[in-house]
Amino acid sequence: MDTVQTKKIDLPITGMSCAACSARVQKGLSKLIGVEDAAVNLAAEKATIQYNPKEVSVDDFISAVKDMGYGVSVSRVSIPIKGMTCASCVQKVQKALAALDGVLSAEVNFATEKASVEYIPAQVGMRDFKNALKDIGYDIVEIGKGEDIVEQERKERERELRHLKFKLIIGAILTVPVFVLMLWDRIGMSSVFSLSVQINYFLQFLFCTPVQFWAGRQFYTGAIAAARHRTTNMNTLIAVGTSAAYIYSVIATFFPSVFEIQGYSAHAYFDTAATIIVFILLGRFFEARDKGRTSEAIKKLMGLQPKTARVVRDGSEKDIAIEDVEPGDIVVVRPGEKIPVDGIIREGYSSVDESMISGESIPVEKRAGDEVVGATLNKTGSFKFEASRVGRDTMLSRIISMVQEAQGSKPPIARLADRIASIFVPAVMGIASLTFVIWFFFGPAPSFTYALLNFIAVLIIACPCALGLATPTSIMVGTGKGAENGILIRGAEALETAHKINTIVFDKTGTLTKGSPEVTDIIAVSGQRSALREQEILMLAASAEKNSEHPLGEAIVNKAKEMGIGLKDAADFQAVPGHGIKAKIDGRNILLGNANFMEDEGIKTGVLAAKAEHLSGEGKTPMYIAADNNAQGIIAVADTLKESSIKAVNALHKLGIQVVMMTGDNRRTA
């Protein structure tokens, strides 16, 4: 029996405005044959679909979404192609591109030697296009980088936000005179310029109509799309409520006799319709703005990766786009540069700041055979490494993917909110209709007017888009803020159950401690803590290290500056990787390093060895200093506790949470 290989796709959805929208899209996608699971996140504006590609395609998803009155955010790119020689090449290229998952359409023009591709950026990208063309013997000329998914979605949101803001401003400007006209007599304007009731209503009609049908157009399109599928959503409530007020007011303006015959006074409620639309637009504007902000964490993570890499091709170094790096490429990294992709060092030695991954700010020494992680920062040396994981397989990409999945996941409370939202709108419509009937038959005169106003009130007041937006938005903000601060939350359920935590485990270095070393002890060989002697030792060590980029050397130099000690120039400086440094200061040969370094240089440490062992037991890093082949003393450096750590631990204790420290140090050191 054949095993069916399912696929997963993240489809960026546009046009959803409330929980009912996301529930309807999810329900519509789930009904498609071949769809095993569909989850729609309103705040992320994304549908995650698990499906059988033999039974259903991405085109089917897009058609279904569009049939429901929503859209799918796609990218378009023009790709210059090298190697096409005849018309048959066009068919080969077009077929290869169209076969890629996530490609919606591909058209190739032989005359211009370009392919126009419409695709979903979450599913496929320029790298995939290039690889597909290479497999059939073609290449891309000056390959563009293609818009990354977060940037594409950000631009889409910005366009939506600008359009919404424009509608809101124009709608508000047109609503102001409607209000003024409604209050014309009450604010004493009739004494300045007299208006008949019908002229007043007519002017209100002129100002309100564009608000109703232009600014409020999205409510009508959303409601009509829902009606075509025999369902309702939040747009239905707004469209029905404001239309009732508007139509009633139009009749009162142009056909007042309709109400006069029944003994009712003809009163217009254009202000009600216009005000409701403007305030709902204001709410939608704030929602759209806040949803855009939640993607900033992902954008910042993506910004950690360099845009180019220096690779060795045909015996020479060449700068290429990060998307073009292939597994097996030899990549060159110089001091101060970010490592572009994951790999294994083949040649060279350096120290690498891996705080982006580990949270520890003390650089890790790297030599041939060691692994390096993309987006981490090379500090001191140069090296060459072999790329092992590129593109979506790098550790940074996997972290980004995990954060995105966490933001898009739904905890039990969100699933409950979605179920409530799916029955909420029809329930409100029923209650509003019942309200109208009760007020019409049992309310005071004019009963029709009161019945209509209360019908509208129920529809509009019971329009809590927050019902379905609050939970996904809080998840996105929570996971996003966590990612910004180095806290990776695996999913929405973990975030929801966080209030049940009774134990928190902290890493020591860089979490509870500052992550940057400081000088803690200066010990002279004689054991006497003479200030002059200590200052001389510190001066020699700092002078030797003053041009060093190693964090331990920087700590020594900072201590000397803090104590106001003047530094001297060092000659014949030499760094011995993994051991220490050599330098000549005022004609004296200075050595600074660990015990192995002293032993290799034939320096006897004597009584200092016991002191160094004691310092090591306290979690400090002792460094011997020798002058002219004689040990002079020890400088100890350690990572000190953050001031905020004590407050944080105390605060957690007050909450009844047990705090545990995880460290590679021994119990005494910890």
Image (cartoon, grey):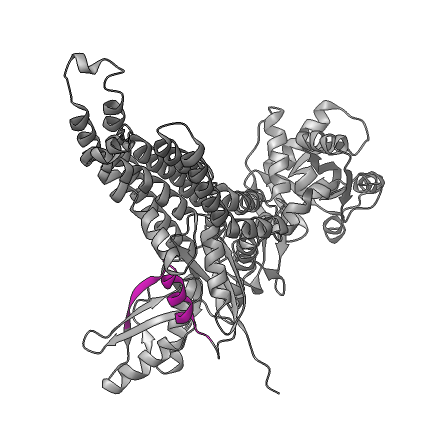
Count of residue discs: 0
Start and end of the magenta stretch?
56-80
318 displayed left or right of 514 = left
Residue at screen point 63% across, 65% down: 369
Could you say which is closer to the camera, residue 324 or residue 300? 300
For the point 24% across and 17% down, which residue is it?
A: 185
Question: Residue 492 or 431: which is nearer the viewer?
Answer: 431
Residue 587: name its quadrant: top right
In the rendering, at what x and y percent does residue 50 appear?
53, 68
Residue 643 coordinates in the image, percent (x, y): 67, 29
Q: Quadrant of residue 97?
A: bottom left
Q: Is residue 223 left or right of residue 353?
A: left
Relative to 195, does residue 202 appear above or below in the rendering? below
Q: Give the image location of residue 559, x and y in percent.
A: 63, 30
**Side (left or right) of 455 relative to 549:** left
Would you say residue 44 is visible in this rendering? no
Front-most of residues 92 and 30: 30
Q: Is residue 519 above or below residue 489?
A: above
Q: Is residue 115 magenta?
A: no
